[in-house]
Amino acid sequence: VDSNGVLNKDGILRKVHRLFPGETSVPAVIEKCSTT
């Protein structure tokens, strides 16, 4: 999250692809993380 409160999508997506290969939807991943 940058100073404007906006997600750094590139960095987030890179992490997402490492943790959840094939998952392209950040909200879906956030949902997975928050429900675990």
Image (tube, rainbow, N blue to C red):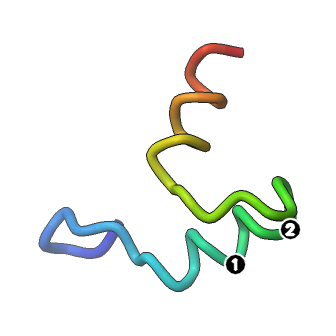
Q: Is residue 35 above or below residue 30?
A: above
Mark 1: which amino acid?
Arg
Residue at 71 percent across and 15 percent down: it is 36
Q: Is residue 36 above or below residue 14?
A: above
* SS under mark 1: helix
Which disc is residue 33 wearing? none
Name the quadrant containing residue 6: bottom left
The location of residue 25, given as percent across then percent down, is 53, 57
Q: Are marks 2 and 1 in contact (CB under 8 Å)?
A: yes
Judging depth in this view, the residue of 23 and 10 nearest the camera is: 23
- In the current view of this chain or complex, which residue is farthest to the bottom? 10
User: Where's the N terminus, which quadrant?
Assistant: bottom left
Name the quadrant containing residue 28: top right
Look at mark 2 in the image and give the residue it sits on.
18
* SS under mark 2: helix
The location of residue 13, given as percent across then percent down, is 60, 73
Residue at 71 percent across and 58 percent down: it is 23
Look at mark 1 in the image and give the residue it sits on.
14
Q: In this view, does 14 lie above or below 19?
A: below
